[in-house]
Image: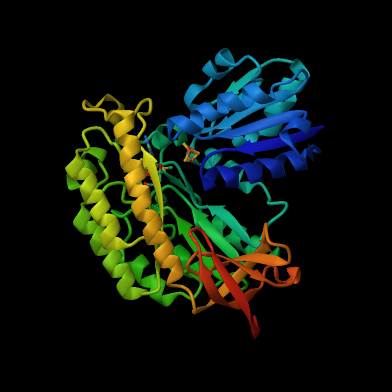
Amino acid sequence: MKFFIQTFGCQMNVNESQKVEALLLGHGLERAETPESSDVLLINTCSVREKPERKVFSFVGRLKAPGRIIGVMGCVAQQYGERMTERERAIDFVIGTQNLHRVPEILETVLRDKSKRVETRFYSPETSLEIFKAPLTSPKVSSYVTIMQGCDRFCSYCIVPFVRGRERSRPSSEVLEEVKALAEKGVKEIILLGQNVNRYGMDRGNDLTFPQLLRKIDSIEKIARVRFVTSHPASLDDETIRLFGELESICESIHLPFQSGSDRVLKMMGRGYSRALYLEKIEKLREIQPEIALSADVMVGFPGETEEDFKETLSLLETVQFDTLFSFRYTPRPMTRAAEYPNQIPEEVKLERLQTLQALQSEITLKMNRLQVGKVKKVLVEKPSKRPDRFMMGRTRDNRVVNFEGPSDLVGREIEVRIIKGYQNSLLGKMEEHHVY
Ligand code: SAM
Ligand code: SF4
Ligand code: F3S
């Protein structure tokens, strides 16, 4: 029996899909090459905005076929529960965010009893972290490690705390065990995942804090690079900031969402920091690590956002000069406070603001990439590049994609590459001679 997992949403979902894949392989199922050739189609879903949510139903609509078992898991599954099977009869089972470790068992009963199953319970902290114990079967050069689940911040626009549950950290012993196992399998780069990684361990009494965890991971041999997402501006502490200048493994890049440049909007969002505090964190980061690359998330069209507020967001972009920016149009989400706020912004205004913002950021990103030309950068080689032929793709420590001509046996190695051109989304480089580590 062949299965295919289609993943929508964030890195957390990508990581969890990998783990579910490992569970299913362990139960004797085989991977299908395409969704069309699968007997069991699993869809891991995202409900953070309206668009990814709609994608799920259109995807099922396109791929339903007689005899094909369809399971929906993740955040939309958690949000809708059994309403999913009512809306789309081709769905055979629905598995919420805290039940992913049960996929094989649930699939077995669906196949045996030819009945539908819906499992969206929330569990005790320990049980709901079970999924993470699944072994990774095909680790790559870079691997995700989830260190915590859920979120307690309840920003007024965000559905995540409702579909992911309360904040729960994995025991540090388990995290370190997983990192060591990945290192043994040849993984060179670890990306730690959580909705607010700076709060790691705070729910676990005397377990390690986030900076303590980073120190322990740094001491694991063979792990050359560590990254983490997502940091929250209100929780990013000075001790963690100092580690950017201290620990060799911590890469010179940080993702620090700001959402809006206006204090009025930040307050309505319930973000817990001001524009000034955000800029202070950026200043400290750049002081400790002048080479640090900055990325962030931002939203336009939050209810009540005026032209003035929007201009403050644009001015924050100008001030900070982000290397990369992920920008979104606000969409109301069920269960969230902001969905009930007055002064929802018309779609055409949101779209216009988004276009203005993206045009400004494109210029900044291109400028930042062009500034790399002439520098020699350490690149961790990940895989053959999509094109052209004979080119390899890797990443710099400041998280830029570099394509360069080189042999495929460089995968997993760190090499020195001279940057010769900067594009919108990547750099072109040339290998320096005699500089393979
Ligand atoms: N925990 C992270 C944080 O606090 O920044 C990221 C959370 S969320 C999974 C990823 C991004 O989606 C957010 O940073 C935000 O910009 C965006 N987002 C969340 N809710 C949204 C909504 N209702 N409409 C549009 N964008 C949204
Ligand atoms: Fe959502 Fe805010 Fe939690 Fe991020 S911190 S997941 S935006 S509630
Ligand atoms: Fe989406 Fe769930 Fe991640 S809502 S962004 S897949 S935590």
Q: Residue furthest bottom?
A: 434
Question: Residue at point 27% right, 68% down?
Answer: 283
Q: Nearer the viewer, residue 425 or 185?
A: 425
- Rendered position, 231 above or below 419: above
- Rendered position, 400 above or below 29: below
With 430 as the anchor, is 24 left or right in this view?
right
Question: Residue at point 51% right, 58% down?
Answer: 425
Quadrant of residue 56 in the image?
A: top right
**Where is residue 198 drawn, in percent x and y?**
38, 56
User: How many marks are shown on the rendered structure?
Assistant: 0
With 321 as the anchor, is 400 left or right in this view?
right
**Where is residue 160 drawn, in percent x and y?**
42, 37
**Where is residue 243 drawn, in percent x and y?**
40, 71
Colouring scheme, one of rainbow, by chain, secondary structure, one colour: rainbow
Q: Nearer the viewer, residue 318 or 47?
A: 318
Query: The C terminus lies in which quarter of the figure?
Result: bottom right
**Which image quarter has ligand 1?**
top left
With 222 as the anchor, is 229 left or right in this view?
left
- Rendered position, 128 above or below 358: above
The answer to whether one can see residue 111 in this image is yes
Query: The N terminus lies in which quarter of the figure?
Result: top right
The answer to whether one can see residue 211 in this image is no
Q: Nearer the viewer, residue 140 or 168?
A: 140
Question: Residue at point 39% right, 50% down?
Answer: 196
**Where is residue 344 drawn, in percent x and y?**
26, 28
